[in-house]
Amino acid sequence: MKKTLLFGLMLFSLAASAQKFTRRDSLQGGLRPERTNYDVQRYDLNITVDPDKRYIFGYNDITFKAVSDVSKIQVDLFDNMKVDSIVYNKTKLAYKRDNDAVFITFPKAISKGSEEKIRFYYSGNPKVAKNAPWDGGFTFAKDGNGKPWVGVAVQGTGASLWFPVKDHQTDEPDHGASIKVAVPNGLMNVSNGRFIGNEDLKNGYTRWDWEVKNPINNYDITLNIADYAHIHDTSNGLDLDYYVLTYNEKKALRQFAEVKPMLECFESKFGKYPFYEDGYKLVETSYLGMEHQSAVAYGNKYRKGYLGMDMTGTGIGQEFDYIIVHESGHEWFGNSITSKDIADMWIHEGFTTYSETVYVECRFGYDKAMQYINGQSNNVENRKPVIGIFGVNKEGSGDMYYKGALMLNTLRHIVNDDAKWWKLILDYSNAYKKQVIDTETVVAFFNKQTSMELTPIFNQYLRHTTIPVLQLKLDGKNLSYRFQTDEPNFEMPVEITINGKPIHVKATNKWQKDKATIKSLDDVKVATNKFYVKVENL
């Protein structure tokens, strides 16, 4: 195990040396003492948004606990946004900017264990996304009636694009957040959590107040400004709230009927919806979608599939609304279970992409589920590792989605016992509910629960570009087989059918011979619908 871990670390070092990272990257992605010396307890955001001027101003109250004696902390805010002032105990604090990091100095050290609060006033024109949600930023659009329609999506780019925050996934506010957003009269703002109330500010603006009870990762905190209609429903005691453009209410009532069977499926496989206290919402957006916790962004235009398309080429993808299912799956994987570093974002995207297959199996059965997930293999590039570079805000390749899901499907068939598999997934969801973890934690859990050594398998799929190649050759009248992998000491069970009879063999990097007599390699079939491997006949 130590050898395989060292090998992976060597690969990361080589990859890092081939890329150039800036100080800005390190400030955003790294864990400096000025970040680790305090633990965020709560955010209380109170801002005004002017859609016409694309301008925001206000403050964020940051309540934190000192992890050690604290003299200086790092809070992040994109450098195009203005720091107006930072106040602590009615005193303005000294600060120094370094790229998007703001280093704040206290007049005297805060003692370890103390809970304190600063109020960070700021203003400016936040970055506008060119193609949300793939690049981070605001969207300033108009609805069909010409009214403002504003949203924001910042996964990967960072929440500090639009408000002051400790912009690192290791630290979620332990006691939730409040999001208060004032918008022009006649519009509504929808944010995470529960609606608390609104107030006419008598200046042409109305403030809409929302409260989040649960920990929440930074990029999930959101706002949605539009002329919305509100639809309310319930599912097994869970509040379902839909906010859609007023003229789309009838479409939404039809399309969102899929929510209840989806939630029933996911709760049966992944456990109780993680954020009952905050409810479940779908909010119509001008961009495609995003997993904003308890306020899922929906922009699929009331179509089945992915904007009407099937990304798998099987036809099954057009049997359900991709955005509803995928982004809601993130409530368990990404929002409840969060990766410490975005280099490990496969923990979000691999499991969530797999949740699509889980939903297909709930609705249409195992065979359709296998067709669906194997259709996803056409989208895997195998050019870069799934895991990115740590400490510099660098995600891995887009293969984290489909390759991550196919790896999980492979693990299911390695376990080869569906009762054990679904218990494993349920136990994983519950064991790390509302926690921040890393790849090593996932692998250790799967190893322990299965009593198998799966580390080399995880490493091959996540830390290397290629997938395992199962080599077959005719050895006299017998079949010989082995795996060719980048990962040393690789070993993985795989299902092979010989002369019509399925068997499981434990293939390694060394040649092994099966006792069955065969005439040619045509008598051998590998279950590539269950195991994401390449087969090579020699």
Image: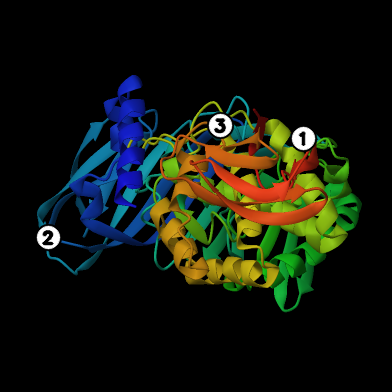
Q: Mark 3 sits on what residue?
A: 54
- Residues 514 and 152: in front is 514
Three-letter code for the amino acid on which mark 3 is drawn: Arg
- Residues 125 and 378: in front is 378
- Tell me how far mark 3 sits from mark 2, CA to CA: 40 Å
Q: Residue at x 22, y 44 (%)?
A: 32
Q: Earlier in the sequence, mark 2 or mark 1?
A: 2
- Tell me how far mark 2 sits from mark 1, CA to CA: 72 Å
193 left or right of 476 in image: left
Q: Mark 2 sits on what residue?
A: 69
Q: Callout 1: few (<14), some (14-19), or many (20+) C-alpha neighbours within 10 Å?
A: some
Label 3 or label 2, whichever lies nearer to me, is: 2
Q: Residue at x 83, y 50 (%)?
A: 500
Counting from the top left corner in percent of width and height, residue 3 is at: 31, 46
Q: Earlier in the sequence, mark 3 or mark 1?
A: 3
Three-letter code for the amino acid on which mark 2 is drawn: Asp
Q: Is residue 247 visible?
A: no
Q: Is residue 234 visible?
A: yes
Q: Mark 1 sits on what residue?
A: 520
Eyeballing the image, is 68 above or below 9? below
